Image (cartoon, rainbow, N blue to C red):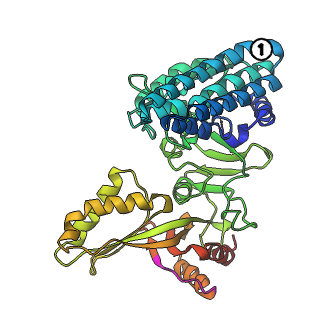
Amino acid sequence: MKFGGTSLKDAECISGVAKLIVRLQKKQKLAVVLSAQGGITDALIQSARYAARGKESLWRKVKQEIKRRHFQVVENLLSPDKWPQVELKLSDYLADLEALCSGIMLMREITPRALDAIASLGELMNIEIMTEVLRSKGIAAEAIDGADLLVTDEGFGNASPISDLSRAKTRKRILPLLQENIVPVITGFRAATRKGVSTTLGRGGSDYSATLIGAALDAREVWIWTDVDGVMTADPRLIPKAKIVPALSYREAIELSYFGARVLYYKTLEPVIKKRIPVWIKNTFNPASKGTRISLRSNSRSNSSGGVKAITSVARANLVTLRGGQIFSFPGMAAKALDALANQSITTLMVIQLSADNVLSLAVHHKELDQVRTLLQKTFELEMRHDYMGPIEVMHQAAIIVAIGENMEGTPGIAGRIFGALGSNGINVIAIAQGSSEMSISFAVRSADVKEAVGALHSEFHL
């Protein structure tokens, strides 16, 4: 069971999670993965940035606020006789923060390796608190550093796990505890290289930690606790009447997470798919809600009209277009562009090609536009200088909307209904893409039309 930062934002929330663990532990053996308290990881990263700018007073102020929040939780939830031992452990991690920030300030540079070490300190502090809270409630528990379980490459900031080594270390460390009915309380998103150097699995990677550990332990299920009742048919901020989707297939859930559904980190399901371990999305603040079950097949053809199960959207995107001349082949242009983006781990939301006209359009997140434009200009500098290509064109204020459903495959008329509903509402479609699996249809509209477009589809398919 993994609990996110919103589930652990203060003493009251941590107490609620502890009570939930106590209740559920009576029914089954549990391994628990925790994020940092809400907002703490951002604060830690901010302290590093202040240090890199030489702002000692500011990073020390952040450090004091982090200390205040954690000590306040300790003193609210534990008896005074437990305060010194827990606060001593927390002070050790705060001393690590000070040492790292001092080093960064001296160098005026944050290395990815140093940032990983700093960013994961919140998880280390949180597991110490939760372990003692559980013990105070009569539950045998042990704090476990995820760096002692998960082995990764040296991709600091977004490391990739080495499955066989991670599985072996996880089973050796965790299975004996479970056999003794001890609850392991494990850091989320924190791992280490073969040499023991701290890494992280990327922001949002605590979900990924949970499924990696769950797969290693051959868990019956993985439950991800968050602050919503499950995966919704659309973003409830756009569609207040959006409903919970009771069941999703792995493929549907991956597609939704890739295109912006914030409930699930996009890498989360990779470890559990081969073992067919179901993943539940549940609400810490409404545990009675059944939530969303993600498994091999969702078996829910009747859940929607025509096979569309959910609508997701990226409200702020840009369309970047490359136009090649007749001398520069389309395959060569596309390969060069996509290879350049892949080398910088830049995600493309949608790719549209017009081979006859030698045109390639890429939809990218707005926050990555400057990086993408600079990268492509550098990549095609020679071709543009010799007029083998035209200048890079950018369409601003675009939104990407995706209709998703495994049962769309082989169902006639879905595209007609989608674009008919948009046309009836006067919404212009800028670009369209559909994969050969027919599981999703993606299209771009103006950002100003995103709410109306999602609403039109939500109504058309009776979601």
The amino acid sitting under disc 1 is Lys
For residue 149, side relative to residue 342 (left or right): right
250 vs 100, nearest the viewer: 100
Q: Is residue 462 magenta?
A: no
- Asked where in the image residue 194 lies, by quadrant, the reply is top left
Instruction: Name the residue rendered at 61%, 31% in the picture.
Output: 122
Q: Which residues are magenta?
A: 425-431
373 vs 241, nearest the viewer: 373
372 vs 123, nearest the viewer: 372
Q: Is residue 277 visible?
A: yes
Number of on-image labels: 1
- Asked where in the image residue 5 lies, by quadrant, the reply is top right
Look at the picture and state if 185 lies above or below 37: above
Is disc 1 surrounded by few (<14), some (14 to 19) or many (20+) residues within 10 Å? some
Please tell me whether mark 1 sits on a helix, a strand or a loop: helix
* Secondary structure that dominates the magenta span: loop
Q: Is residue 428 magenta?
A: yes
Q: What residue sits right under mark 1 in the picture?
A: 82
Look at the picture and state if 398 lies above or below 258: below
For residue 107, side relative to residue 101 (left or right): left
